[in-house]
Image (spheres, grey):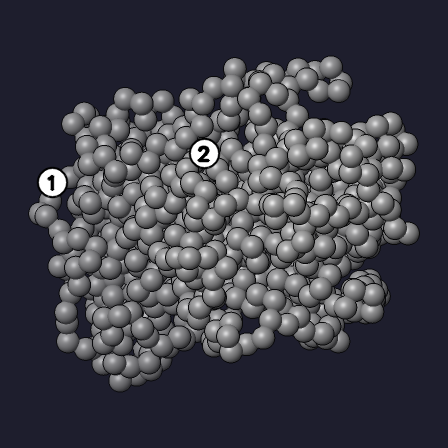
Amino acid sequence: MVYTVSGIRFPSLPSLQKSSHLSFHADRRSASFSFLLNKNSFSRKSLAVKCSHDSDVSSSTVAESDKVLIPQGQDNSSTTTDEVEAPDITSEDPQKIQKLTMKGEKIDYEAVSTDKEDEAGQGHVMSSHVDVDTNAQAENTSVSIKKEVKIESEEARPMTIGPPGTGDKIYEIDPSLQAHRAHLDFRYGQYKRLREEINKYEGGLDAFSRGYEKFGFTRSVTGITYREWAPGATSAALIGDFNNWNPNADVMTRNEFGVWEIFLPNNVDGSPPIPHGSRVKIRMETPSGIKDSIPAWIKFSVQAPGEIPYNGIYYDPPVEEPKINTYVNFRDEVLPRIKKLGYNAVQIMAIQEHSYYASFGYHVTNFFAPSSRFGTPDDLKSLIDKAHELGLLVLMDIVHSHASNNTLDGLNMFDGTDTHYFHGGSRGYHWMWDSRLFNYGSWEVLRYLLSNARWWLEEYKFDGFRFDGVTSMMYTHHGLGVGFTGNYNEYFGFATDVDAVVYLMLVNDVIHGLFPEAVTIGEDVSGMPTFCLPTQDGGVGFDYRLHMAIADKWIEILKKKDEDWEMGDIVHTLTNRRWVEKCVAYAESHDQALVGDKTIAFWLMDKDMYDFMALDRPSTPLIDRGIALHKMIRLITIGLGGEGYLNFMGNEFGHPEWIDFPRGDQHLPSGVVVPGNNNSYDKCRRRFDLGDADYLRYRGMQEFDQAMQHLEERFGFMTSEHQYISRKHEGDKVIVFERGNLVFVFNFHWYNSYSDYRVGCLKPGKYKIVLDSDDPLFGGFNRLNHTAEYFTS
């Protein structure tokens, strides 16, 4: 099974790498896409209303009604796509407070949209002021400024990595950084020094990041050259099926930099000296003894049935090699599903080869090789090609924060030394992850990792990366046992690994310089300042920060009683991000869906999901509450959480169970045995059929997810500069905010519903529903009249 995020939506993303039928080396086209996953409203209900108006009134108030959880008999209401036409209402006084009263309706959540006689949802971006009662709290929040960028085609723009800037702009953006200028200037000085040295000795980052064209196996017209950096080895030989594993047949030579090399000429008939599919390894005499290792730059590695170690595979397939396996299944069966739901990107996890399946792809052994469990490299290319045809960007979950400590299949002790690719001693070992930590100050490590990032973009046409474990990289304490408070002393001091931060700056230079449309997301929980600012301005260079605190907060809240949910805590977590630094929000992480934890749906409904999700059976209060809250959690996360939204596969319809992988017992060096699951494949899947079944309640949850995507596509609220939180009432358990031309109203109260409830709105006029979580289509109770008209006053 391929680990993947089912879908992502980002605001105004760049172009896809379009692939041709005949080749995987395709052009990048100019286009833009919106990435976002919307979130559902609470078990009561949600609605969105749209306003026709004429004046640019500075503020208005909306009175909102509420619904209770218990089903009630009502007239059939229109679907979420129904719109109410009405004459414009003009206000003569721009300072006049408008009131919108919804009579006789009970609402739990509503998304209210305003537009100026524009059915497409376009309207003015204005600041907002609202009237609230004495118990309500008003709060201003800031979001990243939307940028209009014209993307040219690759043919019209050369791929170049720009020179370093002055690194001073970060002080204009955040004057608080002046107190740490010594650290930041030192960091930028290290970055510039490395850029200068790479330019001097390697011809620039462009050439330096193409290490895969020099190291590993390279094919020419006359034969195959193999190069490997292994300074600790005293002798080396290339062995494999092609030479009957004879260590004396193909002995390598070493240069003054510790690079071993051998050239194998073509056979007399012109065929390559190493046949496609041959197993290959490098045998080295090292200070630790004789060692057979998989080449560090290997492009494909396989574990034979019944064997423990992997083997490197020389991969040079015939043009017409069959493509069959799970990459192909994912291409044919899952990608169309993602497109249909309304997503415009997919993030694929566990691509880099990892010998231990249960590491979920994070203990990488072969950094340039796609995992053979899911098919061949060409199968993966075919998957990406198909995604591009569908208009989907493909992001790869890349692991440069650590590596497997496996000495048989991976880089650990590659040349027999502890300090080859990694720091020596305790600094080179992550005690919690049981893995090795790279030495980002090493020249050849930089070449290896920069080239690795470029390889996936250039060879496979990925559209960008989510960098895993960035917090662990940036600090010598790896973020363990440390609570970041936002004090800048926590970010700029001796605990910061400047070499690692400079590497992140370099890799963002390579990616954005050579692939301007590529997207980089950093998984950082620390809140490192300047993280999502350009390197030319002194920043680290990421496009987005993954807003990790949100998913953790939802699990924390779900463990509480309904009456203990704090509206201010929810709002603070969703909006706690740095100004002009964009974030990707998500309600459920892959960690929570793995064995040992629960999905959000399972936290909410638990074992009732096994017996009460069929529509021909009675529901239970736990199911009704769970379905409603599941929708609310997702919708408020997309509404307030960031400038992009990510959904883990299955969360779009409330997948009931966890994911597990075939694994045997693991024997740790300490003697502790971690039990396996007898290599069972039982939970190694996602039950997408549940969301498609029209006789199950999962279907409504999935339909709502699709409706949210279209809501954002239509109104584009995630890219709006206008965000204003007008109410977070702890007594009523109500949250009201505006984003773009929408007003969102959430009622998290476990039994109270409200009628004639006033809420603030930016523009006066007549409002109408554009999204209602209580619609029967979404498994709701049909308690709102979609033909009703709501006026400000």
User: Viewer-proximal residue, 119 or 347?
Assistant: 347
Measured in 3D between alpha carbons, the distance from the residue under mark 1 to the one under mark 2, in whole angstroms, is: 45 Å
Residue type, numbered disc 2? Met
Quadrant of the image for the C terminus? bottom left
Q: What number is the disc on residue 73?
A: 1
| Local secondary structure at mark 1 | loop
Instruction: Name which residue lies at 37% across and 65% down.
Output: 716
User: Viewer-proximal residue, 334 or 328?
Assistant: 328
User: Viewer-proximal residue, 269 or 329?
Assistant: 269
Residue 751: quadrant of the picture: top left
690 relative position to 439: left or right: left
User: Viewer-proximal residue, 326 or 63?
Assistant: 326
**Of the residues tagged 1 and 2, which is closer to the observer?**
2
Residue type, numbered disc 1? Gly
Where is residue 348? Give x, y as percent: 49, 45
Residue lying furthest bottom: 92
Q: Can I make out residue 316 in this image?
A: yes
Q: Earlier in the sequence, mark 1 or mark 2?
A: 2
Where is residue 769? Give x, y as percent: 22, 59
Residue lying furthest front: 268
Q: Is residue 700 above or below residue 387?
A: above
Where is residue 717? Give x, y as percent: 39, 64
| Local secondary structure at mark 2 | loop
Q: Label 2 near label 1: C-beta < 8 Å?
A: no
Instruction: Name which residue lies at 48% across and 73% down.
Output: 153
143 relative position to 340: left or right: right
Instruction: Name which residue lies at 83% across and 69% down.
Output: 200
Binning the other alpha carbons within 10 Å of mark 2 as few (below 14), some (14 to 19) or many (20 upward) gives some
| Residue at which label 2 appears | 1
Instruction: Name which residue lies at 33% across and 66% down.
Output: 715
317 relative position to 468: left or right: left
Q: Is residue 544 above or below residue 404?
A: below
